[in-house]
Image (cartoon, rainbow, N blue to C red):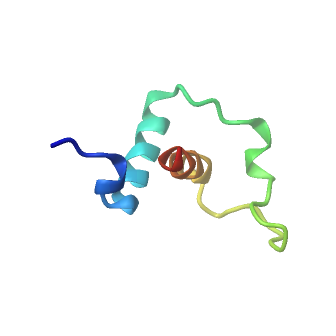
Amino acid sequence: PSSSVKDVNQHDFVKALSAHFKKSGKLKVPEWVDVVNTVLLKELAPYDEVWYYTRCASVSRRL
């Protein structure tokens, strides 16, 4: 029996994939990542320094 991404705990998967993205260095982080806000109603950028890797991992899980 094969397993898919949906069979794994989503929090653990996103956390591990985010760490892999950061460690591998293959994901180019844009220059504007520290000044952008993630939601229209938010005024500040996210506090988590690696939020971009986490967001990319979360989106890639959905693909």
| Residue at the bottom extreme of this rendering | 41
Q: Is residue 50 above or below residue 22?
A: below
| Residue at the top extreme of this rendering | 26
Instruction: Tell me the residue at 79%/60% (across/down).
Output: 37
Quarter of the image with the N terminus is: top left
| Residue at the front extreme of this rendering | 1
Question: Is residue 33 left or right of 53 when viewed as pictured?
Answer: right
Instruction: Tell me the residue at 80%/54% (across/down).
Output: 36
Q: Nearer the viewer, residue 57 or 52?
A: 57
Question: Is residue 63 left or right of 10 when viewed as pictured?
Answer: right
Question: Whole-percent x and y of residue 59?
Answer: 57, 49
Instruction: Tell me the residue at 59%/52% (across/down).
Output: 55
Q: To which quarter of the image does residue 56 belong?
A: top right
- Tally of numbered discs: 0
Q: To which quarter of the image does residue 38 belong?
A: bottom right
Q: Nearer the viewer, residue 5 or 18?
A: 5
Q: Is residue 54 above or below residue 1?
A: below
Q: Is residue 48 above or below residue 21?
A: below
Question: Whole-percent x and y of residue 3?
Answer: 24, 45
Question: Whole-percent x and y of residue 5?
Answer: 35, 48
Instruction: Tell me the residue at 39%/62% (across/down).
Output: 11
Question: Is residue 56 left or right of 29 when viewed as pictured?
Answer: left
